[in-house]
Amino acid sequence: MSIFKFSKSKILCVGDIILDSYIEGEVERISPEAPIPVFNFLSERFVLGGAGNVVRNVCAGGGKCHLISVIGTDKESENIKSLIKENSLLSANLIAEKNRVTTVKKRHFSGQQQILRVDYEVKNDISQKTQDQIYALYEKKIQDFDIIILSDYNKGLLTISLTKKLINLAKRLKKIIIVDPKRKSFEIYKGANIITPNYNELLNTSNKNLHSDKSEEKLISSISNELIKKFSFSAIITTRSSKGISIVSRDKKVFNLSSKALEVFDVSGAGDTFVAYLALATSSGMELEESSVIANKAAGISVGKFGTASVSVNEIFGNIEKNKKLFSLGEAKKKLEIIKKSNKIGFTNGCFDLIHSGHVNYLINSKKYCDFLILALNSDLSIKKIKGKDRPIINEDDRVKILSSFDFIDMIIVFSEENPLKLITTLKPDIMFKGKDYKLKDVVGSKEVSSWGGETKLIDYEKGKSTTKLINRIRNEA
């Protein structure tokens, strides 16, 4: 079963639920009363927004999710309850406050053009009684879940005192906590593992004048490092719309992932989709960089949809298949005949079983030296011969699907031979990559690559990262 299905993931979400209303109508004339359009109502539909959209996406990814949130006692709260009941993977504790309106965003559309948005909301903090109820529910539920998401739309649920208590309990129980922030100060989230602001949200936490001479990526790195040090975060992932994402971790490593050009139809809810799939991938055992690649892919699909939307696992597979990267040797040779004149062709090979951040960084660094990167992937059969009967952990179909989702890999060829020499001599790459744990003279194909004017480059491996170590750790903890 593909790890993309995330069927064993259990996510607990605490945050501001919103009822998103989409009102369709027609505009055919201007009002005689004022220079404004006359909107003729046709229909209205409702979807879960805010924290509700986060949990919708978790469930669309196949994970089980529980939501703790606050609503009013109005008819809109009944709409929210009905929408939650429709999803078999979603459960919820919704606390009703008598003097609170349910947050609603009513968007009026004519065709695909948004005419007006009307918001109904109360932003003041929830009562102490409600805070105590939320914490009691959270304390009761948390042991049953892998990942905690705090979806903060700054609507009054995640008060300073409550948020600190939620994070402190998660830390004591060694649960990973991910925060999607909407505040100018991140101090309230101190001690959380991962923070996922967009670029503007990150910028708002800092004095921009202190960083005016820096590029966008350096600015993100600088502000993120300040916040990580100040508030003890493990990492900050900044979403940058069409420019991709930037990950800055506690060890000051920076990982920038670009996005493929997409037709952006509607950005509402893309951040919810990102944090949902980040949680799903993290709970399945993926490391931060890998989880971010999957989350970025999901968010990229989301912006191509109308309105607040969820993204399914099948859509992620479809998005990967649309840009097919798996080639036979014959197909690869034909493609290279077309592109080789204007592109520097790179080549690397390996098992890439139980993919970790060391693999990701190795591939990213390899791509820096070429325009088109080919990955020759050992088949299941060849891995068994090399590593033993208990390997691979991840079968070749799933390894291909995971690796195909990485933008820095352009082509994948699965091979069953003892080594990739046949592929190298057939494809004749301009540059070949291998890890620095090899000596140049021992790299299969290096002499052949040199013979046609190419080069072999040894790439640094991330210290302490290896599939064997991961497997041993899992077995020891089982």
Image (spheres, rainbow, N blue to C red):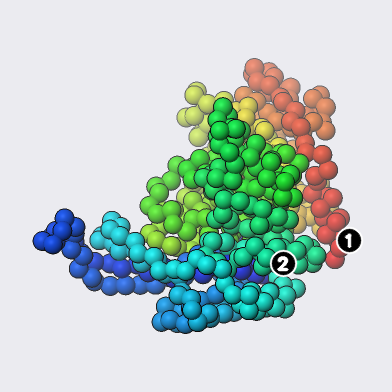
**Where does the image place residue 219, in percent across and percent down from the top left?**
59, 35
Q: Is residue 356 left or right of residue 272?
A: right
Q: Write the residue at 20% across / 68% down.
A: 40
**Quadrant including the N terminus:** bottom right
| Residue 173 image label | none
Residue 412 appears in view: no
**Quick one: label 2, few (<14), some, or many (20+) residues within 10 Å?**
some
Residue 436 versus residue 27 in the image, above or below: above
| Residue 165 image label | 2
In depth, the one of 133 and 29 nearer the eye is 133
Judged from the image, the secondary structure of the residue bearing numbered disc 1 is helix
**Where does the image place residue 410, in percent across and percent down from the top left?**
56, 39
Q: Write the residue at 50% across / 34% down.
A: 335
In depth, the one of 336 and 251 nearer the eye is 251
Residue under label 1, please give it: 476
Residue 201 versus residue 437 in the image, above or below: below
**Quadrant including the C terminus:** bottom right
Amino acid type of the residue that numbered disc 1 sits on in the rendered structure = Asn
* Mark toward the start of the polypeptide (2 vs 1): 2
Q: Write the residue at 76% across / 67% down.
A: 169
Q: Write the residue at 81% across / 24% down.
A: 441
**Where does the image place residue 344, in percent across and percent down from the top left?**
57, 25
Judged from the image, the secondary structure of the residue bearing numbered disc 2 is helix
**Quick one: label 1, few (<14), some, or many (20+) residues within 10 Å?**
few
In this rendering, the label closer to the viewer, 2 or 1: 2
Numbered label tally: 2
